Image (cartoon, rainbow, N blue to C red):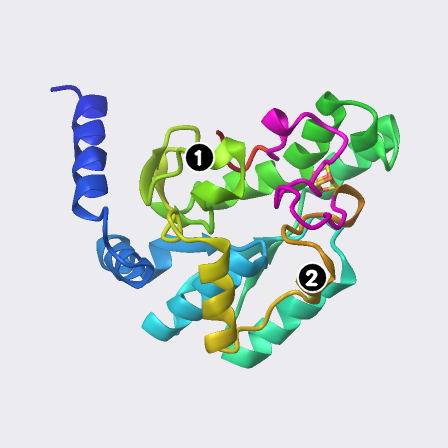
Amino acid sequence: MSEAGELKKEILFLQKQHASASAEDILSWAFKRFGTRNVALASSLGAEDQVLTDMMVKIDPEASIFTLDTGRFFQETYNVLENTINRYKIEIQVLFPENGAVEEMVGRHGPNLFYYSVENRKRCCRVRKVEPLQKKLATLDGWICGLRKGQAVTRKEVQKIEWDDDNGLMKINPLADWSEKGIWDYIRLNSVPYNTLHDKGFPSIGCAPCTRAVQHGEDIRAGRWWWENPDYRECGLHRS
Ligand code: SF4
């Protein structure tokens, strides 16, 4: 069997083996399989990632966590970053985009380029998020994400354990089958620090110019790039 065939077989086996495993069990498995320094949480500092941070630190205080600072965050996002570091007494690695690439993009297309076309919006996400992420992922064997099936039409097929073909490493989504209620029950029960924008109608929080509050009953990702067709509303960090 080819290497790709072996890998596919292994992933299918792991998916089956961990189908009913709890999020904590999946994390413990990932730490054991890759070693704590070779698998890391890519945290957006949103509610799901805060749940994962709490779980990871409780399992292993040395767990690796990083975030991608695009330079366009809300102040509330910096507040939750600081509160999380202080609460758990951990280091969260903050990654920045390459300054030359940002200067070139803003110089050529303007500071608000994302509003003018999907192409421009994807260009900005690529420079500010995807490229710094790819650089980091090249140093890891697995990455952990807070994706849930129920978050968006683009995430319906999310599995707890997947192979990330684009980046060539394992992708672990311990909360794949969690509900939004489950996330908030966990946050309250464990007094997990969270972004206060969640209390102001922001269920999903990204960069300030590309995120707005949603109305009651609206899709939870309706406030992200709200001017675009929902089928395309991903930043390129996660392929649908
Ligand atoms: Fe740029 Fe908006 Fe993407 Fe942030 S979410 S990187 S500001 S396009």
Q: Position of residue 138 (x, y in %)?
A: 44, 40
Q: Nearer the viewer, residue 90 or 221?
A: 221
Q: Is residue 183 left or right of residue 106?
A: left
Q: Is residue 121 above or below residue 93?
A: above
Q: Position of residue 155 (x, y in %)?
A: 47, 36
Badge 2 local density, few (<14 within 10 Å), some, or many (20+)? many
Secondary structure at numbered mark 1 = loop
Q: Start and end of the magenta stretch?
A: 211-235
Circle 2 residue = 77
Which one is closest to the eye, mark 1 or mark 2? 1
Whether residue 89 is visible, yes or no, is no
Q: Residue at x 78, y 22 (%)?
A: 117
Q: Residue at x 82, y 30 (%)?
A: 115
What label does residue 156 carry, if any?
1
Secondary structure at numbered mark 2 = helix
Q: Nearer the viewer, residue 231 or 133?
A: 231
Whole-number angstrom distance, CA of label 1 to CA of label 2: 27 Å
